[in-house]
């Protein structure tokens, strides 16, 4: 949200303004208005909160290093209004204002809509079929022969592309 110019000055990138508490644990950022996502929707504090909450989730698998960085450093993140975000860190982290822990901010509505479409379409997939396919591929690709210098084709995941596409086309 903040960039550093070649002459060492801090300038707002997505941030119109920012404040750092004297103890170095609380950061408050005011976003510029009219910053747009690729889909044309405006970036709001709720999108930033949503993106950080994904990283704070114990189920975060988005980018493992990013998830652990957020979980190790961010205590809380909250929207004070549509354009203001307050972060409370667990420990001082001086580059936070510049790196933001390298979180990619995503449009909350688009992600939720996409997930809704995925949930609706997966109803056509038979869980037993997926489990059987997983077991088949796991057994074949972990076989002792797969450790050989010239493993058989069954050890290559590419062998199973057609098998994997069959249940996916039902979704």
Image (spheres, rainbow, N blue to C red):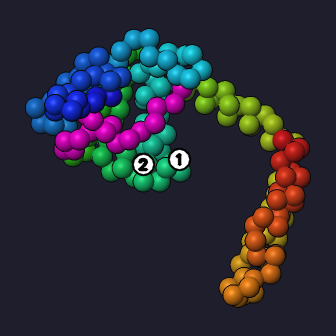
Disc ID at residue 62: 1
Q: Which residues are magenta?
A: 92-107
Q: Are marks 1 and 2 in contact (CB under 8 Å)?
A: yes
Give the crowd class for mark 2: few <14, some 14-19, many >=20 residues within 10 Å.
some
Secondary structure at numbered mark 2: helix
Q: Position of residue 108 (x, y in %)?
A: 55, 27
Residue lying at the far top of the rendered structure: 34
Foreground: 48 or 154? 154
From mark 1 to mark 2, how far is it between C-alphas? Answer: 8 Å
Foreground: 107 or 25? 107
Query: Is-magenta flag for residue 162?
Result: no
Q: Position of residue 13 (x, y in %)?
A: 32, 24
Foreground: 99 or 26? 99
Occupied quadrant, residue 130 = bottom right
Which residue in the protein does label 2 denote?
Answer: 66
Quarter that holds the C terminus: top right
Residue drawn 35% across the image and 32% down it: 77
Secondary structure at numbered mark 1: loop
Occupied quadrant, residue 52 = top left
The reply to whether residue 51 is visible in this rendering is yes
The reply to whether residue 59 is visible in this rendering is no
Q: Is residue 57 left or right of residue 125?
A: left
């Amino acid at each position: 949200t903040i960039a550093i110019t070649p002459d060492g000055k801090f300038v707002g990138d997505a941030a119109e303004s920012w404040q750092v508490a004297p103890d170095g644990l609380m950061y408050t950022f005011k976003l510029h208005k009219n910053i747009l996502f690729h889909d044309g929707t405006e970036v709001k504090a709720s999108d930033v909160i949503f993106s950080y909450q994904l990283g704070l989730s114990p189920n975060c698998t988005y980018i493992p290093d990013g998830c652990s960085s957020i979980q190790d450093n961010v205590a809380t993140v909250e929207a004070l209004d549509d354009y203001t975000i307050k972060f409370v860190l667990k420990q001082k982290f001086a580059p936070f204002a510049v790196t933001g822990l390298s979180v990619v901010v995503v449009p909350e509505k688009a992600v939720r809509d996409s997930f809704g479409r995925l949930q609706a379409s997966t109803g056509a997939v038979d869980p037993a079929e997926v489990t059987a396919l997983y077991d088949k591929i796991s057994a074949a690709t972990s076989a002792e022969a797969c450790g050989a210098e010239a493993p058989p084709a069954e050890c290559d995941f590419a062998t199973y592309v057609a098998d994997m596409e069959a249940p996916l086309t039902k979704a």
